[in-house]
Image: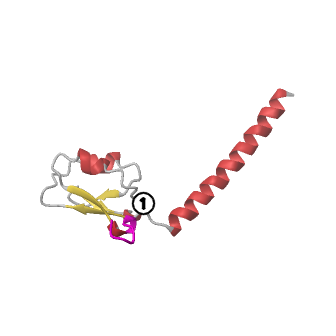
């Protein structure tokens, strides 16, 4: 009898998580994170740290092995690539920096 209860609980849990994932994907489609990636290609030595460790897989490689932005809208602004780039070749900025500013300018 406990196995059935556990199975039922598991089914409810997976149904709930599926609903949450669907809701999250709808929200992310409607409201992009709002970050842009700037790559200074002359500074980059193509080490691949940004490509390998980006949690959202924003970057890909070009023919020379340097990073290119493939999925820029997926960036969540974690700044991992910017902080770990040994050449300071990547900068992350908000696309809409004034969106957090209040109407009185502060």
Outermost residue on the right side: it is 1
Q: Quadrant of the C terminus?
A: bottom left
Residue bearing the label numbered 1: 74
Outermost residue on the bottom side: it is 103
Residue drawn at point x = 31 percent, y = 47 percent? 80
Q: Quadrant of the N terminus?
A: top right
Instruction: Specify whether residue 49 is in view.
Output: yes
Instruction: Specify whether residue 66 is in view.
Output: no
Q: Residues within 10 Å of mark 1 (few under 14, many from 20)?
A: some
Q: Which residues are magenta?
A: 99-106
**Residue 65 location in percent, x, y?**
23, 55
Q: Is residue 51 left or right of residue 27?
A: left
Residue drawn at point x = 18 percent, y = 55 percent? 89
In this picture, is 89 found above or below 6? below
**Residue 47 location in percent, x, y?**
21, 47
Badge 1 marks a residue whose secondary structure is helix
Secondary structure predominantly adopted by residues drawn in magenta: loop
Residue 19 figure quarter? bottom right
Is 58 part of what is drawn in magenta?
no
Q: Is residue 90 left or right of residue 55?
A: left
Outermost residue on the left side: it is 42
**Residue 44 location in percent, x, y?**
16, 54
Depth check: give the residue in front, 46 or 55: 55
Residue 100 figure quarter? bottom left
Q: Is residue 106 left or right of residue 18?
A: left
Depth check: give the residue in front, 96 or 58: 96
Residue drawn at point x = 71 percent, y = 49 percent? 15
What is the tally of numbered marks visible in this picture? Answer: 1
Depth check: give the residue in front, 27 or 49: 27
Residue drawn at point x = 65 percent, y = 48 percent? 17
């Amino acid at each position: 009898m406990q196995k059935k209860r556990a199975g039922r609980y598991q089914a409810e849990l997976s149904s709930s998580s599926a609903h949450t994932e669907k809701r999250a994907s709808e929200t992310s489609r409607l409201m992009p994170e709002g970050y842009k990636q700037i790559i200074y290609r002359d500074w980059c030595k193509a080490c691949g740290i940004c490509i390998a460790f980006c949690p959202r897989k924003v970057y890909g490689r070009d023919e020379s092995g340097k990073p290119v932005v493939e999925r820029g809208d997926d960036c969540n602004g974690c700044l991992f690539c910017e902080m770990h780039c040994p050449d300071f070749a990547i900068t992350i900025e908000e696309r809409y920096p004034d969106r957090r500013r209040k109407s009185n300018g502060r």
